[in-house]
């Protein structure tokens, strides 16, 4: 018997067998704010993994570090009844979206992937709305880092500081040698990022909790807060005149190029050094912000998924949710992003010394109650309170307002926003 089938039958059979696959392949429109060099490399990992499974990635990138612009755009898309499939949203805002009843329940994906076992409880709790998974975490970022260019320090005869007193001495030497001591981006979220690290270091973790998490008016208007505000403002004299409005990654580039000595920024900055081919410990040095070696201010990036009707879009959405917690993505993404995996039990082999320090400090700080969520990065308070803190901090930094008055306004503005 001739077993050879005519060509048209073969093609027909191939089409039939491919049909189910095709039908499951859907599109995800993903809103995020990862547009810097390091961030773009990181998000591309997810896009590639999804596309390998046959799905289509529709990129909805909204530039703007810290994500405030992205959140405004997301609101307007949701209000007009046309939200994207998935959006980068974190912290208490996940609960606010949950309240609106527009999120997809991801419990089946979570169950199949044993998320309750893979994720530390503190992380899993943030991802759940009324006990159901509605968001997927991708990483843990540490906020209180200082990125230093050792060559600049050497040329200036200065030491990389671990205390604010040492910072003062080093910054003066660096300035004298003709370099910019601090690469600074004058945008409210960047100012708040530096400010909250100072609050944690100068005031201690309990004071941080009282002010940046509980937003207690008495502590906000206190001598310790005045001290923190003064310390924060003191940095300004060591920044350059082009700082206002500068994007965070351009500030990082100043350290990379050796124009500036250091930057205070979360470890997404490491993604820029990595993308530029730089080696930690050689081309750059990462240390906790002066006075914060015990502390770990954390921030967890996560994605919420909106309800979709289309079956294939649903499949693509679930595939995205699943992939984000699989080891392949967790490793490659976090190596590129500068963060550490949020999933427990990952191999540490691919990670550099900075990431390893983060991993160890994450555990150590949790044991000593020095692991605190970031206010600036939407992990600690609702947006209205965060907005009130941002306004006062940025007005104080960019005017001649006294620290005493700023502390008073912090208390009153926050009380009004609560
Ligand atoms: C996010 C990071 C991001 C950074 C700068 C932070 O709030 O958590 O993922 O890289 O903002 O945009």
Image (cartoon, rainbow, N blue to C red):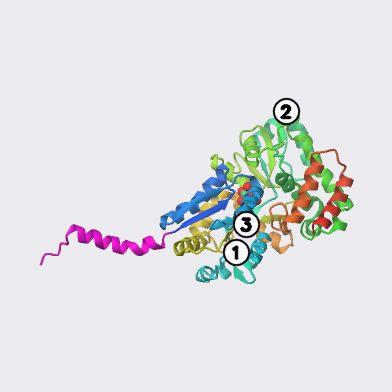
297 to the left or right of 6? right
Q: Give the residue pinned by disc 1.
A: 102
Instruction: Tell me if label 1 and label 2 are in contact, CB under 8 Å.
Output: no
Q: Say which element carries label 2.
A: loop
Q: Which of pointers 3 and 2 lies earlier in the amino acid sequence?
A: 3
Q: Nearer the viewer, mark 3 or mark 2?
A: 3
* Front residue (pair 258, 192): 192
Residue under circle 2?
177
Neighbours of disc 1 within 10 Å: few (<14), some (14-19), many (20+):
some
Where does residue 79 sit, x and y in percent of width and height?
62, 57
Q: Earlier in the sequence, mark 3 or mark 1?
A: 3
Give the Cα separation between the discs numbered 3 and 1. Answer: 11 Å
Q: Which is the main secondary structure of the residues drawn in magenta? A: helix
The C terminus - image quarter: bottom right
Contact between labelled residues 1 and 3, with CB atoms less than 8 Å apart:
no
Point out the tag, 1 or 2, that comes first from the N-terminus. Answer: 1
Q: Return the residue at label 3.
A: 79
Mark 3, other Cα within 10 Å: few <14 / some 14–19 / many ≥20:
few
Residue visible at 66% across and 53% down in the picture: 142
Residue 121 on the magenta span: no
Res 357 visible = no
Q: Gap between marks 1 and 2, in whole Å?
A: 56 Å
Residue 12 percent across, percent down from the top left: 25, 61
Location of residue 131 by image quarter: bottom right
| Coordinates of residue 86 in the picture (x, y in percent) | 55, 57
Residue plotted at (43% across, 54% down)? 51
SS assignment at label 3 = helix
Q: Which residues are magenta?
A: 1-25
Q: In terms of depth relative to the viewer, which is nearer, 230 or 72?
A: 72
Answer left or right for 66 relative to 369: left
């Amino acid at each position: 018997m001739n077993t050879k089938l005519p060509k048209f039958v073969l093609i027909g059979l191939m089409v039939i067998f491919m049909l189910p696959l095709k039908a499951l392949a859907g599109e995800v429109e993903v809103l995020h704010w990862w547009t810097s060099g390091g961030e773009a490399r990181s998000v591309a990992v997810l896009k590639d993994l999804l596309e390998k499974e046959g799905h289509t990635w529709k990129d909805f990138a909204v530039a703007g570090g810290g994500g405030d612009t992205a959140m405004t755009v997301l609101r307007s898309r949701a209000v007009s009844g046309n939200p994207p499939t998935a959006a980068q949203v974190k912290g208490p805002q996940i609960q606010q979206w949950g309240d609106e009843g527009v999120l997809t329940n991801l419990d089946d994906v979570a169950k199949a992937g044993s998320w309750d076992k893979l994720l530390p409880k503190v992380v899993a709790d943030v991802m759940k709305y009324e006990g159901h998974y509605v968001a997927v975490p991708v990483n843990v970022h540490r906020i209180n880092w200082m990125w230093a260019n050792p060559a600049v320090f050497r040329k200036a005869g200065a030491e990389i500081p671990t205390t604010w007193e040492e910072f003062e001495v080093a910054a003066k030497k660096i300035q004298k040698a003709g370099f910019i001591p601090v690469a600074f981006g004058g945008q409210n979220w960047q100012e708040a990022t530096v400010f909250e690290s100072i609050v944690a270091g100068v005031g201690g973790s309990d004071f941080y909790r009282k002010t940046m998490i509980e937003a207690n008016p008495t502590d906000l208007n206190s001598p310790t807060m005045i001290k923190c505000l003064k310390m924060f403002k003191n940095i300004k004299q060591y920044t350059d005149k082009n700082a206002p409005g500068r994007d965070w990654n351009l500030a990082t580039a100043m350290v990379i190029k050796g124009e500036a000595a250091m930057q205070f920024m979360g470890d997404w900055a490491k993604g820029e050094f990595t993308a530029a081919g730089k080696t930690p410990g050689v081309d750059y040095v990462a240390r906790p912000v002066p006075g914060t070696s015990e502390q770990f201010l954390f921030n967890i990036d996560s994605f919420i998924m909106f309800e979709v009707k289309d079956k294939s879009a649903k499949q693509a959405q679930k595939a995205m949710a699943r992939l984000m917690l699989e080891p392949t993505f967790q490793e490659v993404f976090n190596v590129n992003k500068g963060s550490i995996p949020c999933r427990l039990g990952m191999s540490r082999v691919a990670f550099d010394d900075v990431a390893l320090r983060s991993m160890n400090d994450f555990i150590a700080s949790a044991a000593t109650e020095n692991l605190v969520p970031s206010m600036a990065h939407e992990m600690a308070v609702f947006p209205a309170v965060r907005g009130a803190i941002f306004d006062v901090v940025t007005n104080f930094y960019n005017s001649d307002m006294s620290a005493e008055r700023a502390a008073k306004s912090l208390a009153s503005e926050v009380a009004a926003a609560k």
